[in-house]
Image (cartoon, rainbow, N blue to C red):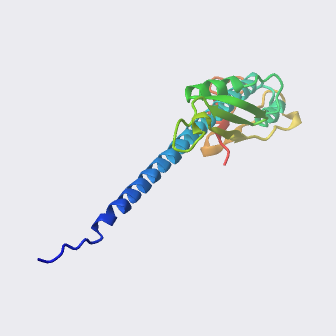
Amino acid sequence: MHPRRYGDAGQAFPIYITVVAGLLFLAFAYLAVGQAAATRNEAQTAADAAALAAAQDRRDQLARQWLENVLDPTLWQGIFDGDVDGLDLSCWRADQLAAQNGAHVEDCDPGLLSYTVKVETDEPVGETIVPGTEGQYATAYATAVIEPRCTFDLPAEDAGDEVLPGLTCKDNRNWDLNPEDLIELPGPEDLFDVHLAD
């Protein structure tokens, strides 16, 4: 009878356990990275929505100013440049949209034709294999800009009050304005574009 030989089969089990433990650790690490990335994406979505909402409210106010002063074209350029007195802050709209996206506004900075917003998520990243993430919140910034869509040339000084300049706007949408027939006028979206800054 031949003596039984013991090979290396028993040594494979510890290696298997080590490999499985390593793979599990990697899986949890990827999960932690995924949770953090998802929270950052939520913060960026909230910041984008908040900045756009504030800028759209500013656009609407500028459009109302233009309508109120449509018979005084000398004021139009200031309106299209955003340099107008009497505009209200639009950060309240940023607050609304941030809240609808699970965040709150940390800072809201208006420009003449822009709004920059910083938000922080209401919920933290949560517990992961990485220590400390349960108390970590994501923050994000976004800037939305208001861009005039129309240009115009002031009429000659001797043209009189009965002449208004026409608006030459993007997408070949032009407006010939008659001071005696101001029924169909451009709306806020005709006068201004609102988009996120590049």
Residue at 72%, 24% (x, y): give it: 67
> Can residue 91 be seen here?
yes
Q: Which sits in the foreground, 165 or 83?
A: 83
In this view, the residue farthest toward the right is 157
Q: Please indicate whether residue 35 sits to the left or right of residue 99 in the image.
A: left
User: Which quadrant of the structure image shows residue 137?
Assistant: top right
Q: Position of residue 83 (x, y in %)?
A: 82, 33
Please give the count of numbered marks on the rendered protein. Answer: 0
In this view, the residue farthest toward the bottom is 2
Q: Position of residue 76 (x, y in %)?
A: 79, 32
- Is the N terminus in the top left, top right, bottom left or bottom right quadrant? bottom left
Residue at 73%, 31% (x, y): give it: 108
Residue at 67%, 40% (x, y): give it: 142
Residue at 61%, 40% (x, y): give it: 173
User: Which quadrant of the structure image shows residue 3?
Assistant: bottom left
Q: Which sits in the foreground, 29 or 155?
A: 29
Rendered position, 141 above or below 160: below
Q: Which sits in the foreground, 112 or 67?
A: 112
> Can residue 59 be seen here?
no
Q: Please indicate whether residue 37 sits to the left or right of residue 148 in the image.
A: left
User: Which quadrant of the structure image shows residue 160?
Assistant: top right
Q: Position of residue 119 (x, y in %)?
A: 66, 33
Q: Which sits in the foreground, 105 or 179?
A: 105
Q: Position of residue 26 (x, y in %)?
A: 46, 53
